[in-house]
Every structure is written in structure tokens, then in C-alpha cells.
């Protein structure tokens, strides 16, 4: 159990367009989900914490109007990169924490975004 | 702020060799420490953890001991296998930090026959 999926696994888009990435907990409910960004040869950087039914909490330096997060259900959170630019190209990873039980994050496989 | 430093990779070893991946940390407060593993094409998986000084986390033959005096949590395995080839991330979580994880940069391990 505790499987997290992301869709799409990779996406290429043109500069100025918006891209939506989905994060789903497949076999458990997740009140809290986390969105990370990873640059090549660098660590995962937490972008925001997403709580079901409430506004996301963004880390310092992350533009909330550019990275829109919606956690509308206990199994789905979405990250929308608005008006994407080449510098937004990165690897985006989500994780989910079970609503009840152990305090552990379960990670998705990541989404590679390339903005041309 | 909190940070994790781990050795750069890639680390290339022959099968059955001894593995050490160094990890040191700085933290405000008393952190829990973790090692995650990421196999190709998969998400990060928790490998082992330790929540207080001198605790030893272990799993699948891997071990790491929480050393408060040296602020370290080095990952070791006595005999690696080809199937251990993956990227390993050291991470910490500070109590009261909202369950936020702070990661190191990851170390790629390649095990060859």
C-alpha cells in the first residue's frame, strides 16, 4: 500500500502556456500533500504544503500566483505552473502523508517539465 | 537554517563491496534523520530512519547511526548488490517543523558485477 502517482510523467510546453501536474494517492487518503522541485544535481526543495480543503502554504520565495495548488479531495492535489518560462523547467515531485497512522511521506515518481 | 550535506556521486562499486555514503547535517532543534532511496523511474522510498541520538536505523542490510556529537548519519552496507544501484538521499525533519523534510543533494550509487 501507500502508492502515489503523478501525471504526466513528462511534459514539454511552449513558453507562456500553463501546465497542470496531478498527484494522486492511489490506496490511501491524504489530508496533506507536499510539492517539491528538483534541479539537476541539487536537493529536493519544498515548494508548498497542500492541505485538503484549504489554501496551500508556500515556502519563502515561491510565487503562489505562478504555482497554483489545488487540493480538492483526499486523494488528489494539482500543481499548475502558469505562464511557464524556460527557467521553470525542472523535475517536480509530490508526496502525500496519510490522514491517519504513521507520520511518513510517500513520494510520487516525479514529473519532468521542459519549457521551450 | 536546516541543511543536509552528503557526498557527491556517482559512487561506483563492485558487487559485494562495502558501501559508505557520508551525510552530515545542521539543524535548529533536535531532528529526526532519514535515508531515502530512489530506484530508476520510481518515487523516493523511505529506507531507514532514526529519531534520537545513538539510534541505529536498519533495513535491507543498510544501516545508519545517529551521531549527535559529529552531526552525522552515514549510510553503510557490508556487501552491495547490483540491485542496490539507485540514488540515495539523506534528509532531516525537525520536531515542530510542520513535517517538512530537508534533503541532501542525493548520491548516485552504481554497483557493477
Image (cartoon, coloured by chain):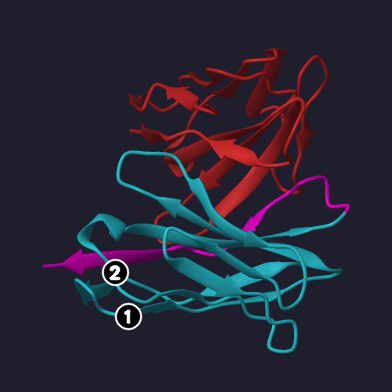
Chain colours: A red, B cyan
Q: Are dots 2 and 1 in contact, CB under 8 Å?
A: yes
For the C terminus of chain A, the quadrant is: top left
- Which of the labelled discs sits on residue A41, or is there none? none
Q: Position of residue B101 (x, y in %)?
A: 68, 52
| Residue behind mark 1 | B18
* Residue B26 to residue A51: above or below: below
Residue B103 drawn in magenta: yes
| Residue behind mark 2 | B80
Q: Position of residue B8 (x, y in %)?
A: 40, 74
Residue furthest toward the top?
A73
Q: Crowdedness of circle 1 by 10 Å Cα count: few (<14), some, many (20+)? A: few
Front residue (pair A1, A52): A1
Q: Residue A97 lies in what quarter of the image? A: top right
Q: Is mark 2 on a helix, strand or loop?
A: loop
Q: Which chain carries label 1?
A: B
Q: Which chain carries label 2?
A: B
Residue B54 drawn in magenta: no
* Residue A76 to residue B97: above or below: above
Magenta region: which residues? B96-113
Q: How far apart are marks 2 and 1 (CA)?
A: 7 Å
Amino acid at each position: 500500500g501507500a502508492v502515489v502517482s503523478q501525471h504526466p510523467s513528462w511534459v514539454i510546453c511552449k513558453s507562456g502556456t500553463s501546465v497542470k501536474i496531478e498527484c494522486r494517492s492511489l490506496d490511501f487518503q491524504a489530508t496533506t500533500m507536499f510539492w517539491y522541485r528538483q534541479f539537476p544535481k541539487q536537493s529536493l526543495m519544498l515548494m508548498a504544503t497542500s492541505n485538503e480543503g484549504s489554501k496551500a502554504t508556500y515556502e519563502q520565495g515561491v510565487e503562489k500566483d505562478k504555482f497554483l495548488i489545488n487540493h480538492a479531495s483526499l486523494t488528489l492535489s494539482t500543481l499548475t505552473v502558469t505562464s511557464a518560462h524556460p527557467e521553470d523547467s525542472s523535475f517536480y515531485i509530490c508526496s502525500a502523508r496519510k490522514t491517519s497512522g504513521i507520520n511518513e511521506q510517500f513520494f510520487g515518481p516525479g514529473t519532468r517539465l521542459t519549457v521551450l | 537554517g536546516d541543511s543536509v550535506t552528503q557526498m557527491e556521486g556517482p559512487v561506483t562499486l563492485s558487487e559485494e563491496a562495502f558501501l559508505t555514503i557520508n551525510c552530515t547535517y545542521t539543524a535548529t532543534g533536535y531532528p529526526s534523520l532519514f535515508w531515502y532511496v530512489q530506484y530508476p523511474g520510481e518515487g523516493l522510498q523511505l529506507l531507514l530512519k532514526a529519531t534520537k541520538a545513538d539510534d541505529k536505523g536498519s533495513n535491507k542490510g543498510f544501516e545508519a547511526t545517529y551521531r549527535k556529537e559529529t552531526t552525522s548519519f552515514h549510510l553503510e552496507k557490508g556487501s552491495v548488490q547490483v540491485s542496490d544501484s539507485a540514488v540515495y538521499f539523506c534528509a532531516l525533519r525537525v520536531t515542530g517543523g510542520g513535517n517538512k523534510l530537508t534533503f541532501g543533494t542525493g548520491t548516485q550509487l552504481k554497483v557493477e558485477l
